[in-house]
Amino acid sequence: MITDIYRFNFGGNVCTVEIGMSLKGLNALRRVPVSAKDTLYVYDDNTEGLFAGDIEKITGREEESAAVRVVIDHGEEHKSWESVNRILEKAVESDFGRDCTFMGIGGGVLTDLVAFASSVYMRGSGLILVPTTLLSMVDASIGGKTGFNYHGYKNLIGTFYPAEKVCIAIETLESLPENEFNAGIAEVIKTAMLGDEELFGMLEREKKRLLGRDGELLKEIVGRCVIFKGRLVEEDLRERGKRAFLNLGHTFAHALESSVNFKGILHGEAVAWGLLKALELGAQLNITDYSYMERVKNLLLDYGFPLKYDSIKPARLISAMYGDKKKRKGNLRFILQRSIGDNLIEEGISEELLNRVLSG
């Protein structure tokens, strides 16, 4: 079965992304080193039961006992130093050298954690990511951002460390819970908003096929998102310019997640809400085209995203925003839009205006 292969140069580091329908069809997995002393497999408590045997066999381990494996708890509340430490302790305990490879198999939380651990273990070890959620496939595993939540703030500690290989098998989405799958669509919508009008139209037309997890459609959508993000990150690995546009909606989203202590609201759900809030802020500033804002709102509603969280007070959200790593010299930074692909950065937004937007 045909796989799609993309190569990106992220700050001098080559990242190969392979997208296929099945795990067994991914050449990149079959070429992973197989010595028990050079590969650390990291799963969460969902993916370990679903994929451990398959992936270890594909990479050449005929006996399950040969694999060096660590399993961490899934969920945003476990995106913490404690989880990172478990990974590092396993590598030390297994006497891994600098030439080892960390392989992370899971969603965005897990891939961020494994990538961070790999970036700091002996000042940098090999890194392969096998994203198993839609959100991780289209966003988290691509581009080299790593990190974990700290002191109640989202991804406050992190590094830039691109994976050498990202191995995407569409079949892994078949076992994904409905709410997790749907949450990943928010990042697809964000990508379309940032500059892929054809993708936006696909999302409007192909809702039934997408929610039905049509494999060929998913492969195309994931590929479009990977290409879009990959090319942007090639220009700006460390977010000194255009890469910041990928934070569209995320200043709002991260504040929402922090406000509920990373429980009860999925990241994608927070992003969907944040996308609309960013457009509403732009409309208040006479920047965002109203008809475009309504088009995005209708799309978000069509995919069932909750767009109101009235129980969370604006003051709590604003306080969380000021802990966000995207601020500069004490000023909050928001990615706003005039229309699809017409993006800008705005600073110096008053708390009065934020209150108005968050109260709406």
Image (spheres, rainbow, N blue to C red):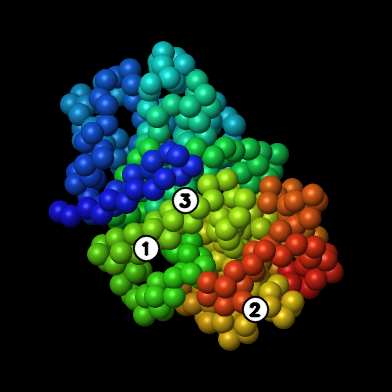
Q: CA distance from mark 3 to mark 1?
A: 15 Å
Of residue 62 and residue 32, the one placed in the foreground of this image is 32
Residue receiving disc 2: 288
The numbered dot on residue 224 is 1
Q: Residues within 10 Å of mark 1 (few under 14, many from 20)?
A: some
Decide which of 338, 128 is in the foreground and name it.
338
Foreground pick, 328 / 210? 328
Separation of disc 3 and disc 2 at Cα?
Answer: 28 Å
**Looking at the rendered structure, which numbered label has been put on residue 234?**
3
Q: Residue at x 57, y 45 (%)?
A: 238
Mark 3 or mark 2: which comes first in sequence? Answer: 3
From the viewer's perspective, tell me whether residue 183 is left or right of residue 222.
right
Which is nearer the N-term, disc 1 or disc 2?
A: 1
In the image, residue 289 sits, relative to residue 93, either above or below, namely below
The amino acid pointed to by label 1 is: Arg
User: Residue 122, percent across and down?
Assistant: 50, 20
Q: CA distance from mark 1 to mark 2?
A: 25 Å
Residue drawn at (29%, 60%) of the image: 219
Residue 258: percent from left, percent from top: 67, 50
- The local secondary structure at tag 1 comes to helix
Image location (x, y in percent) of residue 135: 44, 55
120 to the left or right of 359: left
Horizontal side of 154 relative to 233 (left or right) equals right
Amino acid type for the residue under numbered disc 2: Thr
Residue drawn at point x = 45 percent, y = 64 percent = 188
